[in-house]
Image (cartoon, grey):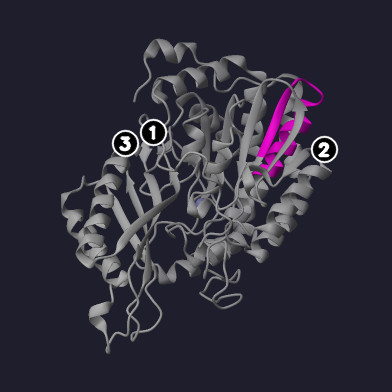
Amino acid sequence: MRLQPVLLLLLPCASRALPGGESETALAAVEKRAEELSALNRTIWTAAEVGLVETKSSAALAQFLSRNGFAVRAGVAGMPTAFVAEAGSGKPVIGILAEFDALPGMSQKALPRREPLESGAPGHACGHSLFGVASAAAAVAAREALGGGPGTIRLYGTPAEETGIGKLYMAREGLFEDCDAVLTWHARDRSASDFFSTKAVVSAKFRFRGRAAHASASPAEGRSALDAVELMNVGANYMREHVPEDARIHYVITDGGGQPNVVPPAAEVWYYVRADSFAEVERLFARLLDVARGAALMTGTEASHEVESECHEVLVNRPLAERIHANLTRVGPPAFSEEERTFARQSQSDLGGSFEKSLADSIEPLPADPGKMKSSTDVGEVSWRVPVGALQVACYTFGAPGHSWQVVACGGMTIGEKGMLVAAKTLALTAVDLVRDPALREAARQDFVRRRGSSPLRSLVPEGRKAPKAIR
Ligand SMILES: [Zn+2]
């Protein structure tokens, strides 16, 4: 959506200098901690903990914030690794999101070739070790730059992003309600103000109950829950032809029974349903419930389902995107060395295709209209409650997909950490801007209200449902 020219005139000038050298203080506050931030990243990168059990990673970030004058509330929203760290007081309240969960089976050394650190172990294939550290550093730097002045900087330690759990349950507890704006970022293969929406998603587990029996001696007595799972999947796969093009339906069978000579009395299949809007996800999910009912009817079993998490599509925010673009331009993209370029070039060898560069060393222009990513994030849940501004910074091999070993490798060495410092500085400048510039906050709020509309936020997760204790 394009801004009206008159609104453009009302927006604060993107290059407006902060008073009293605050921006220099913020930049220096990150730079002087560069070694400490690298060590913190290596701790989280090596620990590589998956969602809801990120004990060491969460504690390392909370301790860093606590050492730097932040009051930490750990274990919020019923999740031991979720925390809120706050410094300063009163309005405005500016939030910064930090993620720190790793992905199962993605262990990888910081080398330009595929080589696990520990075979089968998790790894930071989404760059969340860098994410957590840069966000915490930005919070500390912003608070340092603001001195004792009014305004609150709040860092949200958000676990289990990879299954869309952390921010959803934190948001449902109302933890974002008093924020004037929230900032976030993500490691990518290029640097840009992140003016992208995402797909909405719902995650649900379908369980079938049948009747056990000897599969050979008395099959007529059995009712197979696994049959129901298989027929549900057949139904969903036929449904695929008759869904909008933006829809995505994927599943894994998480319980298919014990062994072949027992008719499985219980079985479970885990589905994600995605589309460009949450409204479309709701429509598709209602049809999938019918498919599950049909499978139960055909097999003489009983179906039930549990919606564990959901993410709305991200609502972009133009004024925040413009300010982030201006601040990223001021900080500049990561300056990679020849050695780092060689590392990245070697790591491109198993990607297929040819690449015009090994690492992105420029800043992408800010597009006039928001782009659309085909993935989902629980940042969407925050963005429907308060204005959210987002950033992406080149932290790994150009052309490498997310969730690849190249992302893990670069995140455990200087390539990722250079990007991490750029992110920390850009977010710190933007947080200080948001505290000092009421016109920016107001422009962000107006843009949020216009895109958000006034209808109540819808949810497929039952009222009162608590965060799960584990991913599976
Ligand atoms: Zn991620």
Mark 3 Cβ inside 8 Å of ligand 1: no
Q: CA distance from mark 3 to mark 2?
A: 42 Å
The magenta segment? 135-155
Residue where numbered disc 1 is placed:
367
The amino acid beneath tag 1 is: Pro
Residue 102 image-quadrant placement: bottom right
Q: Which circle's residue, 1 or 3, is located before the other in the chain?
A: 3
Q: Nearer the viewer, mark 3 or mark 2?
A: 3
Q: Position of residue 465 (x, y in %)?
A: 51, 44
Question: Which residue is painted at 27% across and 51% down in the image?
Answer: 288
Q: As displayed, is residue 67 above or below residue 356?
A: above
Q: As displayed, is residue 444 above or below residue 45?
A: above
Residue where numbered disc 2 is placed:
69
Do callouts 1 and 3 mark residues in contact (Cβ within 8 Å)? Answer: no
Q: For residue 239: magenta?
A: no
Q: Nearer the viewer, mark 1 or mark 2?
A: 2
Looking at the image, can residue 193 be seen? no
Q: Which mark is residue 279?
A: 3
Question: Which residue is painted at 37% across and 29% down in the image?
Answer: 368
Q: Which circle's residue, 3 or 2, is located before the other in the chain?
A: 2
